[in-house]
Image (cartoon, rainbow, N blue to C red):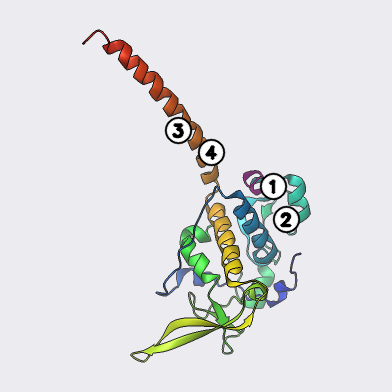
Amino acid sequence: MKRFTLILMLAGFPAWALASGNHTKLDPVKIDLDDTASLQRGARIFVNYCLSCHSAGYMRYNRMGRDLDISEELVKENLLFAADKVGDLMKAVMPAEDAKKWFGIAPPDLTLIARSRKPAWVYTYMRSFYRDDKSPSGWNNIVFPHVAMPHVLYEWQGHQRAVFKSADGVPVFEKFETERPGTMSKEKYDEAMRDLTNFLVYLGEPAKLERYRIGVFVILFLLVFLVFAYLLKKEYWKDVH
């Protein structure tokens, strides 16, 4: 069920945030655009939790449905919360004008976030929120220090505290400690974030799926052509020896 209350609590992800970063070690993530079930789960997470504030303005609902084997009926029933027609673009629930008024800046479009930031960054970022009483939102992030965006999925992951050690007077992240468990285990939450990252990779270049499908037929054609080419070669050279 869509969490409309999140609209009121979300601080926008600043546009300048996309240009900043640090040297935190990023965790590897398995991206598999052939895993349709993972892409479908990622789409559900994105629509229910991210689309409240962030758009995917270069993607249409019906294109997503076709690519991910989701019928238009299911799109209308389960994914069409922020639009009226399946042919509409995936716009945020929160109007950009309101976001700018409330938070000072509108949350950025996420269509290309996995291409600009890379999948490992997105995956690590979504698993690196921790409680910080000094932050306006009450949350901070190891991958993106002082980010304005709060932890939207804290109910799933729970509350975790970041432990730092001092290196030449500079605090260096060491590990996370759980303060309050979430509704998901660590393994389940990591898998959900992998699904979301997988979907964001698809959003950044949906044509990849079509190229993969065409590629199968191209390989099959080349294999068949190789057989005929070999037989033709034998026919031409049979009298030479």
Say which label, 4 or 2, has the lower sequence index.
2
Above or below residue 31? Residue 221 is above
Q: Which of 67 and 241 is in front in this view?
A: 241
In the image, which disc is placed on residue 213? Answer: 4
- Under circle 1, the secondary element is loop
Asked if the residues shown at circle 2 and circle 1 are in contact, with their CB atoms under 8 angstroms apart, the answer is: yes
Mark-to-mark CA distance, 4 and 2: 25 Å
Q: Quadrant of the N terminus?
A: bottom right
The residue at which mark 2 appears reads as 79
- Under circle 4, the secondary element is helix
Q: Is residue 166 magenta?
A: no
Q: Which of marks 4 and 2 is in front?
A: 4
Seen from this angle, which residue lies furthest top?
A: 239
Mark-to-mark CA distance, 1 and 3: 27 Å
- Under circle 2, the secondary element is loop
Q: Residues within 10 Å of mark 2 (few under 14, many from 20)?
A: many
The residue at which mark 1 appears reads as 70
Q: How crowded is mark 1: few (under 14 residues within 10 Å), some or many (20 or more)?
A: some
Say which label, 1 or 4, has the lower sequence index.
1
Say which label, 4 or 3, has the lower sequence index.
4
- Dividing the picture into quadrants, the one containing residue 188 is bottom right
Q: Residue at x 67, y 77 (%)?
A: 102
